[in-house]
Image (cartoon, grey):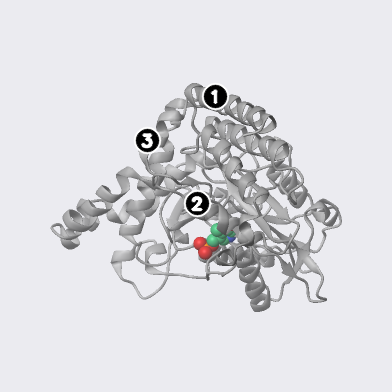
Amino acid sequence: MNQVSEIHDDVQLNVKDEQQMQDAQDPLRDLRELFVLPDGVIYLDGNSLGALPKATADIVAKVVSVQWGQGLIKSWNDAGWIEMPHRVGDKIASLIGARQGEIICADSTSVNLFKVLHAALMLAKQSPHDAQKRIVLSERENFPTDLYIAQSLCKQHGFELKLVDAHQLQAELANGDRIAVLMLTHVHYRSGAVHDMLLLTKAAHAVGALTVWDLAHSAGALPVDLHASNVDFAVGCGYKYLNGGPGAPAFAWAHPRHANVMEQPLNGWMGHAAPFVFTPEYVPAEGSHRLLCGTPPIISMAALECGVDTLLAAKPLGGIHALRKKSLALSNLFIELVDKTCAGFGLSLLSPREDLKRGSQVSYTFESIDGYAVMQALIARGVIGDFRAGYKSVDGVMASPDILRFGFAPLYIRFVDVHRAVNHLREVLEGKEWKQSRFKNRSIVT
Ligand SMILES: *Cc1c(COP(=O)(O)O)cnc(C)c1O
């Protein structure tokens, strides 16, 4: 080993000591023990599929073998199955500034978005002065499913989906007489950029538009206050920071000023005022309970409840505000170490550097087309992040670049993990490990 690399190693060691100290002083450090995390894996993809809480397997097994196996149909009452969409919704409420009884847990994010966006469009149509309001405004790079749902609803109901870049939203709203609904995702799935929910909701209301916010990358990662921001409708995802497991049920919320007048398009018996009276006519349930449609998936919801309970275990330690503080410290450390040790290897930071503007993930573009291979090489070393392909616009121009994405779920990521992950990243890039052909085969799910 030559002198230069010895010095380099010393510096690395000191940095690592510092991180071990940060972990020792982290008030949330013990929460990691609540999760199953495979040996040798640094999991930086909790923003896409949250890790498994240790309690989940036993709870799901109990729901299956005791509640279902022994209790059979009696468990709808005896085990409280029928209340689960509300009970789990109430647990999520405290994380996002909603009140008890306002959130239902059901279906997928896509389906819930369909319900609340439809409700918003119908409210806009019913408003007597608003015949000219026929635009749904969103961000060009919003998550595709959100855009597809909006396209479908706009086509069905005579609205136009207008897509602009994030920085153009405020100007659009300022001249937004024709805007019926502003539909946005709070934290961007690619860049991790956070929208100012309060400011944009205010701007939308100023021109008489309603707002629909998707909290997929916010709920459980950073504080949201739906009431303080005066939002109209919101949806969110159960399998990301809420750790509900693959395909976990999602949630939906409507402001109480709309909940009793809104019409959701999927009228099902679970959203009926009296499901077990079995009348042929649909009468909507009180408030947001009408957002339910069919029978809740109890086994999946039991896993989600366990995920949410695990997140709520942070409450005595400062709750979502403490989680946010740690997540920012983790992502700042990642950015700082990549700046210091990976300079010149073709990575460019896509996420905002400013804390207020960044969610709980950090994304980079890579100079060559092989960003996917870089991520695969990292995964082979046990550092799991993910890759999101860019896309070309209709005229063939690259409208959005490929990205490498690293999520920092503050419940179970340590400062020392960040240090190790960046070391692996540096080694993959420095040694051009990603050039090996085995890293270039793309699986279906990236
Ligand atoms: C993850 C995510 C979804 C997921 O929708 P599903 O219906 O669960 O597939 C939707 N929207 C956004 C913004 C997301 O990040």
Q: Mark 1 against mark 3, which lies toward the viewer?
A: 1
Above or below for 347 versus 22:
below
Do tag 1 and tag 3 residues touch (Cβ < 8 Å)? no
Disc 2 under 8 Å from ligand 1? The reply is yes
Q: Give the crowd class for mark 2: few <14, some 14-19, many >=20 residues within 10 Å.
A: many
SS class, disc 1: helix
Q: CA distance from mark 2 to mark 1?
A: 31 Å
Question: Is residue 133 among what the camera can see?
Answer: no
Q: Locate residue 1: give its quadrant.
A: top right
Q: Which residue is mark 1?
A: 17
Q: Percent from the top left, x then y, of residue 143? A: 64, 62
Q: Nearer the viewer, residue 146 or 50?
A: 50
- At a point 35% along the width and 46% down the height, the residue shown is 306
Q: Which residue is mark 3?
A: 33
Q: Earlier in the sequence, mark 2 or mark 1?
A: 1
The amino acid beneath tag 1 is Asp
